[in-house]
Image: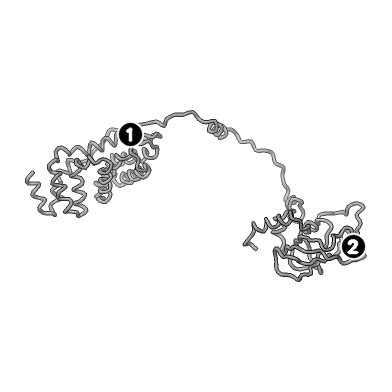
Amino acid sequence: MKKRTSRFKNKALIAPGLSLLMTASLGLSTFSPAFALENLDDVGLFNSITVTRNAREAAKQTKSSQWAPALTAYRQAIANASNSPESKDLFYGLYNAAFHLNDWGTAAQALDTIFETDPSAKAHLLAEYGQVLTNQNRFDEAIPVLKKALVTADADQNFLPTKIRELMTKTETVKEVPKRELTQEEKDRMIAEVTPRKIEHRDMVHGEDVNVQHSANAKSFENAYSYCEFIGICVYDGYEKSSDITFFHPPIANFKIEKILKGPKLNRTFPVRYEFHDKTAKDKPKDWKFSDDIMPKKGSRWLLFTDAAIPTNGAFETFRGNFGRMEATDENLDQIYRVIELHRGQQ
């Protein structure tokens, strides 16, 4: 003992002076536990399937002296354990892997955690702690620790190997997930997963059935907003009378723009081709005849949707004929404002 103690007087000889001591306490690369490292789907003594899998992978790599993957696996196990009490022994494995990789920063962190969770362990790991301090060039701290370690070297040489064996045993101990009765919801879901899915019958929809220019299904505020360049609230101001007004040759109705909801600024006078159908009619209704009563009341307010913001042949064409001309009721106004809000910023 005196011969070893004398080496502490020269800092350069501290690490070599530990050779015999550390060989006895850290000769773990040859440690080969006779455990079958199976990838069992159980919670183990760590009470976690994930942590147990990580720990078993670390043990497998340790047995093969593959220290880098062992270190990674121990780190993953510790991270997934979230500082649970069951995981404190993992730091012995982390230290062991770090020691063999000369990763003294990780080794120091592992020992600090061991001392924090089990203060009594520090007295048995003085040699390991002293070597970590030495290799971090913390010689002033290392010297008194190593002096104490030499006093108890024989008594403590099996402490760390024993801890590693206990960790290996703990890692390989199987603890099944407690069985419980499935809830009705879980049973129903399991039945649904294996039951052939029944696809309900659906009628085929032809393309013409959704054509915006022809289908009744396409007459909506959303389509009117999307396909029209101009939308406004307008006041009816009469129509241009003519002797040849028919169902398919409507009059030109004069409106005055009260408020533009979409589109460019236009002249307040707004002539509109006053259609009597939605442009899908092939025949006029039986007994249909034009009269002043068909036209709206002068001064009434209307929502007008026009395909283009410029007139064609002196008048604006409304979207889908008479569908693009709606009374400006509270309900209709609320619907168009709802659509405008959905498209805000896209105009």
Image quarter where the C terminus lies is bottom right
Q: Which of disc 1 and disc 2 is earlier in sequence? A: 1
In the picture of the structure, the residue carrying the numbered disc 1 is: 172
Q: Position of residue 254 (x, y in %)?
A: 82, 66
Residue drawn at point x = 15 percent, y = 37 percent: 155
**Three-letter code for the amino acid on which mark 1 is drawn:** Glu
Q: Amino acid at mark 2?
A: Ile
Closer to us: 252 or 164 = 252
Instruction: Report the side of 191 relative to 85 (left or right).
Output: right
Outermost residue, left direction?
A: 2
Q: Report the front residue among 35 and 305.
A: 305
User: How packed is label 2: few (under 14 Cα within 10 Å), some, or many (20 or more)?
Assistant: some
Dot 1, crowdedness within 10 Å: few (<14), some or many (≥20)? many
Mark 2, secondary structure of its residue: loop
Q: Splitting the image into 4 quarters, where does residue 307 fall? A: bottom right
In what element is the residue under mark 1?
Answer: helix
In the rendered image of this protein, does residue 8 appear above or below residue 195? below
Q: Residue at x 8, y 49 (%)?
A: 6
Report the number of numbered marks: 2
| Residue 67, image x, y percentages | 28, 45
Left or right side of 248 for 56: left
Q: Which mark is residue 245?
A: 2
